[in-house]
Amino acid sequence: MNLRRFALAAAMMVALIPLALPAQARGDRQTLQHDGRTRSYIVRAPRDVATDRTPLPVVLVLHGGGGNAQNAERMTGFTALVERERLIAVYPDGSGRLSTTLLTWNADHCCGFAMTERVDDVGFIAALLDTLAARYPVDVSRIYVTGMSNGGMMAHILARELPQRIAAIAPVVGAIFEGAPPPKGPVSVLAINGLLDRSVPVTGGLGEGVGRNAWDGTPTQDNLAQGRYWAAANGCEPAPQRAQQGAVITWTHRCPDGRSVQVVQLEDNGHAWPGGQRGLPRADGPSRSYDATARMWEFFRGQVRR
């Protein structure tokens, strides 16, 4: 694997994303010890969280390969929803040779340091959820996970391994790899992909671009396989219904009450967070026909773990 090229491109991506955080988003990382490593994360909670102990939903936002917590916060804009929607947004850091930059997640077959070192990211997130519940008024029935690219792949794995803790996930430009084991339980899913994505292509495979060098060579499945995979776990019909409005194609599986599985494909989106910020000036531009952050929160708030 040519990790040097991956690291260089990722460093450029993180450095060039402009800083555009709300005032309440200033603050330092928090840390916890897990599996012999110091793991870090950023928490954005409503200002009155210390006095108003009403249980709040939690959204975990996982950065892409080569990014970090601040990168995820800038790109997605989830912090802007914290006060208005009364939620806790949490931005965990992956791991890497550097403590707070060029970080990745161990999504089985991707990516980089976390994959090759077999970092226990599932255990880290489970420990993080315990820590959050001890420090904040968390509604444990409304814990949600989203992520970009490598973070989207990790969202699938977290739902697969921790269905008893996660109500729903919304991976963005992520994928499921060939040969993935079945989920351990049902979790609602909204998967968002771009039809112009060459890094995680619609038809599956290894894709193009520098990120491919951080995989172990296992191909991804096609976009719609995410729906089939989770439809089986949720007791939904295997064949989805297709609907299109403008550049937005939505594939919806009919599911039992309280469960939902959808795959959204955007004709005008590549390897980017739709409605969010662009990474490199020459990187794929995000779709302006779909606001991934707003849409997934609308999806999340209707999902409660039972």
Image (tube, rainbow, N blue to C red):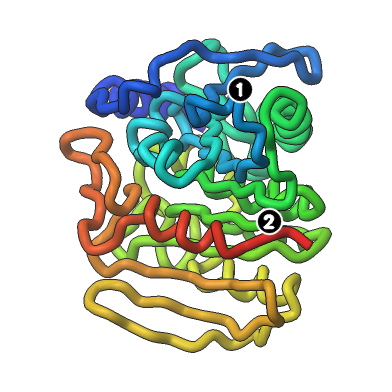
Marks 1 and 2, how far apart at CA: 25 Å
The kind of residue on which mark 2 rests is Ala
Residue 196 in percent (x, y) is at 28, 61
The image quadrant of residue 255 is: bottom right
Left or right placement of residue 301 versus residue 249 in this view: right
Residue 241's spot in the image, x, y percent?
Answer: 49, 88
Residue count near mark 1 (Cα–Cα under 10 Å), binned few <14, some 14–19, many ≥20:
few
The image quarter containing residue 246 is bottom left
Contact check, label 1 and label 2, Cβ < 8 Å: no
Q: Residue type at mark 1?
A: Ala
Viewer-closest of 199 and 94: 94
Mark 1 or 2: the one toward you: 1
* Disc 1: which residue: 50
Asked whether the viewer can see residue 120, the reply is: no
Mark 1 and mark 2 lie on one chain; the one further toward the N terminus is 1
Report the label total.
Answer: 2
- Tell me which residue sits at (74%, 45%) in the image: 140
The foreground one among 51 and 26 is 51
Q: Is residue 90 visible?
A: yes
At mark 2, the secondary structure is: loop
Q: Going 46% across and 17% down the picture, which residue do you hit?
A: 101
Q: Residue at x 54, y 25 (%)?
A: 43
- Compared with 33, 6 (above or below) is below
The vertical placement of 37 against 49, above or below, is above
Crowdedness near tag 2: few (<14), some (14–19) or many (≥20) residues, C-alpha within 10 Å: many
Q: Residue at x 51, y 80 (%)?
A: 252
Provide the secondary structure element on which disc 1 rests: loop
Mark sitting on residue 167: 2
